[in-house]
Structure formats: structure tokens, C-alpha cells
Amino acid sequence: MHEAAAERARPILTTTLAMATGMAPAAFGTGDGGFRAPMEIAVIGGLAASTILSLVVVPTLHCLVADAGTQFGRLWSRFTPSTKHQRAEALEQTS
């Protein structure tokens, strides 16, 4: 997970910073098209939010769900036979 996050961080941050830097003059109303400042501010905010989601929230949720799945699998394996021999014995006991 750490390697994947480090590998994906550079292109995501580069794209976000390039877009936000390009939209900054219009967002602050210093260039032509100052009437679009609210839209530019909203787009920059969306870029920031999606960057945080991509780099922090999604990998964290992935780790939490994977760990929960592993724990559930361990719990489930206690209640289910794991080998063919154990399954056959369990079927014989229920018949």
C-alpha cells in the first residue's frame, strides 16, 4: 500500500497543482473572465477534495475493508470445516 501511494502521489499532485495554478488568476479575478470566479473557486475546491480522497481516504478505506475481510475469514473458518475430510465428517454427523 505504501509503494502504491508513493507511486500515485506524484502524478495526482502534479495534475492538481497545475490545474489549480492555471485557474488561480480567474478565481481571484485578476485576469480576463473575472465573472467566472465562483465557478473557478468551486473547481479548485473540488480538485483539492478529490486529491485528498484519492491519496488519503480511499487507500485508508481499502486497508480497513481488507483487514475486516481477513478478520471475518478467520472467524468464519472457525465455524466451517476447512478440509475435505472435515467436511465429510461434518456431513456424516448431520445425517
Image (cartoon, grey):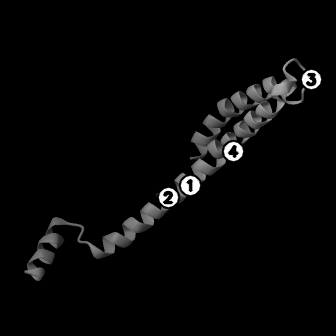
Question: Residue at the location (12% across, 81% down)?
Answer: 94
For this orientation, the residue located farthest to the front is 35
Q: Distance between the residues labelled 2 and 3?
A: 46 Å
Q: Do the residues labelled 2 and 1 touch (CB within 8 Å)?
A: yes
Q: How far apart are marks 1 and 4 (CA)?
A: 13 Å
Task: Give the distance between the C-alpha atoms of the residues marked 2 and 1, in whole angstroms.
Answer: 6 Å
Task: Give percent across and percent down for residue 21.
Answer: 81, 26
Q: Name the residue under label 2.
A: 65
Residue matched to label 4:
52
Q: Is mark 2 on a helix, strand or loop?
A: helix
**Disc 3 residue type?**
Thr
Q: Which amino acid does label 1 sit on?
A: Leu
Q: Which of marks 4 and 3 is in front?
A: 3
Q: Residue 61 carries which label?
A: 1
Residue annotated with mark 3: 30
Labels 2, 3: front one: 3
Quote the CA–CA distance across marks 2 and 4. Answer: 19 Å
